[in-house]
Amino acid sequence: MNLKDFLSAFQQFCILDFIVVALCFGSAFYVHNIDHPANFVPFLLSDIDNQLSEEIISDVYIVASTALVGAIVSCCLWITKKVDLSILKVLSSYLFAVAFTDLITAVLQYIVGRPRPDTLALCGSLEECSNVLNPEKMRYQFRSLPSGNSAQSMAGSIFTTFLLCNIWESSSLFSTIFKFSPICFSLFIGSLEITNRTNHVDDVVMGYFIGALVGFITFSTFKSGIENDKDGSSGYTRGGNRHELLSSKRI
């Protein structure tokens, strides 16, 4: 295999895309596990005297459903349209939206260091948190803004919703509800974060904003890439000298 074939396969199988996804997830994991300095001063100390939070659904299940189930659903939707290596582009784009959102929220959570709503009920006072909580709990307790689960779920939901809208052209009421269902899942996750006293309302809203922005930009980039691939793969017409480009306006 020569260099040209290698680079072609590298691009065709989206290897660089998956490397970027892995780097984003790895960087986010690293930031999530950085301890705050000894002279750390929390930011936004309002509304931290709520009752202890009640974890109804574990963060592990939320992350798994967002990253894994969402990716599988997006790929299945794409298969209904076409079965080729472009499905790898769908998968890598979806995972990038979730991974990059995770990285952004991890950095902001570390910088802001906002206490969660049940901090005083858990520690008694802010000064005692370092004595009451172990390092892992300490990191978690002071990383409320923005809500990571809400942001990641919204990023995946926005990507999947736009994918649905471009694949399924029906305008029936059922199709409209079905297209909106991924966003409903994200809204459900955010409502759990609030009612469980895991995050503040504005934490969730900011998470939604970040996730929606990343999801939209990622899908727009994905769509442009697919359309460019179509244009580039168009050949010459029989007996003619002009390119016959694809005229479809949708993916």
Image: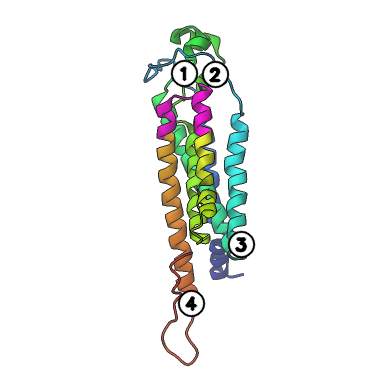
Residue type (three-letter) at the residue carrying disc 4: Ser
Q: Nearer the viewer, residue 132 or 165?
A: 165
**Tag of residue 53:** 2
Tell me if residue 163 can be seen: yes
Secondary-structure class at tag 1 = loop
Residue 16: percent from left, percent from top: 53, 55
Residue type (three-letter) at the residue carrying disc 3: Thr
Alpha carbons under labels 1 and 4: distance apart: 57 Å
Alpha carbons under labels 3 and 2: distance apart: 42 Å
Check if mark 1's residue and mark 2's residue have beta carbons within 8 Å.
yes
| Camera-nearest label, 2 or 4 | 2
Check if mark 1's residue and mark 4's residue have beta carbons within 8 Å.
no
Secondary-structure class at tag 2 = loop
Alpha carbons under labels 2 and 4: distance apart: 57 Å
Q: Nearer the viewer, residue 140 or 35?
A: 140
Alpha carbons under labels 1 and 3: distance apart: 44 Å
Alpha carbons under labels 4 and 3: distance apart: 22 Å
**Image quadrant in which the N terminus is located:** bottom right
- Residue 186 to residue 230: above or below: above
- Badge 2: residue crowd in 10 Å (few <14, some 14–19, many ≥20): some
Q: Which residue is most to the bottom? A: 239
The quarter holding residue 242 reads bottom left
Q: Considering only order in the chain, which callout, 2 or 1, is on the residue closer to the N terminus?
A: 2
Check if mark 1's residue and mark 3's residue have beta carbons within 8 Å.
no
Q: Which residue is most to the front? A: 173
**Tag of residue 117:** 1
- What span is colored magenta in the figure? 189-206
- Badge 1: residue crowd in 10 Å (few <14, some 14–19, many ≥20): many
